Amino acid sequence: VEDINKKYSNHIQFPIFLHYEEEKKEEGKEPIKESKSEQVNSAKALWTLSKGELKSEDYEEFYTTISYDREKPIKYVHTLAEGSLQYKSLFYIPATPPIDMQRMDYRSNVKLYVKRVFITDDDKELLPPYLRFIYGVIDSDDLPLNVSREILQENKILEQIKSASVKKILGMIESLSKDEAAYKDFYAKYGKVLKEGLYNYGENKEKILNLIRAYSYNKGENISLKEYKENMKEGQDCVFYAIGKDLDSIKNNPVLEKFKDYDILLFADEVDNFVIPQIGEYEGVKWVDITNKNANEKIKTEVGEESKKEFESLIESFKELEGVNEVHLIEGISSPLVLTEENSQMNYMEQIMRQMGQEIPEPKKNIEVNIHHELIQKINKLEKTLRNKYCLVLFNGAKILEGQSLKDSKNYVDSIHELLLNNL
C-alpha cells in the first residue's frame, strides 16, 4: 500500500496517512498492540511551486530522485503556464546520458501527472524520440484522471502541451549553446540524437538546425550553421557538404580538391546518412553534396572539346570498366581522378542496406579525369590492353579513397602486381 501511494499519490497536496498496528513487546508481559499513523506521501510537488520559492539545490535534489544521477544536471527549465493552456512542467538535461538512449526500445524519462496524481512514465509520445535523453515531469489540471493510453494519443490538450514542451526544451538547449564549453560537452553526448529531429519533424526544423554543429574542413573543428553562412565567400550561393563513414575517409576523398576555394561541412555519424540530405536548405541557402554529379554546376572544371578528342581513347577505356556510368575530363585538381554519384543520397541508403545483409547492386560511378596529371597523360599514350589495366587500378584506388570496399579486391591486387612486374 505504501509503495502504491508513493508512486501514484506522492505529490498530491493533501497528506495521506497509513494507519497500522504495531506489537509492543516488554519482557515478562503480554505483547500489546499499539495504533500508529505515518504520512506516506510528501504532499508537495516541487514543479507546482513558483520559481521564487525554489533554490538551485531544490531543483538538483529533485533531479536526483527521478534520474538516480549523482551528478548535477547540465541545465533545467521550469514552466508554470497559465491562460488558455494551463500546465506545469520541469525538464532536465542529464549530465549522464540514459543507458538505453541508443536503443530502439528505450524507456521514456518523462512522467505525466494529472492534478499531481501520477498517470504514466511509459508514454514515448510525450516527447519526440530526438529528445529521449530528457528527464522531467508534465502536470496538467485539464486532463481526466481516468485517462487511457488511447485518449492520451488523441487528446488535443495534451498535444498542445507536448508542442509547447518541445519548444521550451529546444529553447533551453539554445540558451546552453551560448556557453561554448558547456555546449561542446552537451553536443558530444547528445548531438547524434538531436540530429534525428531533422528527419520528419518539420515543425521545429529551423530551431534544430541552429543547434546542429558540423565539422568545418577549413577550420578543423565543429561550427554552427550560422557561422558557416556568415563566412561564405562572396558569390557563394549554397552550403557545400560531404557525408562519409568517418572524417578521415572524407578528408582523403580527392573530390574535396574540386572545392578547395570553399569551406566544406563534413558529416560522419551514422544518422547523417538519413537526416543531412533531408535538410535541403538553411535560411534560404541550398545544400549541395559535393560527391553528387549536380555539384559540378557550382564550379567550372570541365575542359573543352579539343581536349576530349585528344583523350578519346582514355575515355573509352574508363567507360569499359564495370560500374562506370559517365566519364568527364576536368582540370584544376592535383589527383589523377575523382568519382561522383548520380544520386549520392541513394548511395548512402544502399550502403546501410548492404551492412544489414541485403543484396543491393553497386551504384555506377561518374569518373572525372584530370587531364593535366602526369600519370593520366602517360596512360593516355599506352596501347589499349595496358591502358585498360591502369584505368582499372586508378578506378579502384579512387573507390578505396572514398572509403568503399572493393567487390573484387583480389583482381585489384593482381593488377597492381602485374603492372609492377612489367616495370621492374
Image (cartoon, rainbow, N blue to C red):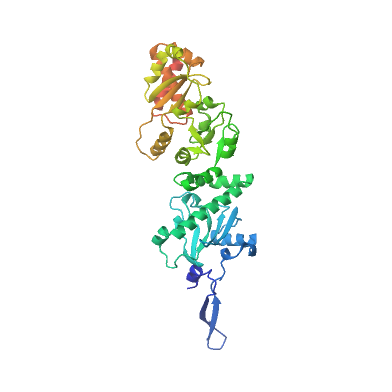
Is 287 above or below relative to 369?
below
Q: Is residue 284 above or below residue 396?
A: below
Q: Is residue 395 left or right of residue 59?
A: left
Q: Position of residue 303 (x, y in %)?
A: 48, 17
Q: Which residue corresponds to the image point at 43% horizontal and 50% vertical from the top-left?
A: 104
Identify the residue shown where x is 58% and y is 29%: 234
Depth order, front residue of 101/137: 137
- Asked if residue 105 can be seen in this view, the reply is yes
The extreme front residue here reads 84
Q: In the rendered image of this protein, does residue 161 appear above or below residue 274?
A: below
Tell me residue 314's x, y (percent).
Answer: 42, 15
Foreground residue among 32 and 107: 107
Q: Which of 272 and 407 is in front in this view?
A: 272
Image location (x, y in percent) of residue 322: 36, 24
For residue 383, above or below residue 184:
above
**Looking at the picture, how far across and down is residue 238, in whole percent?**
52, 32
User: In this view of the protein, can residue 108 be seen by the observer?
Assistant: no
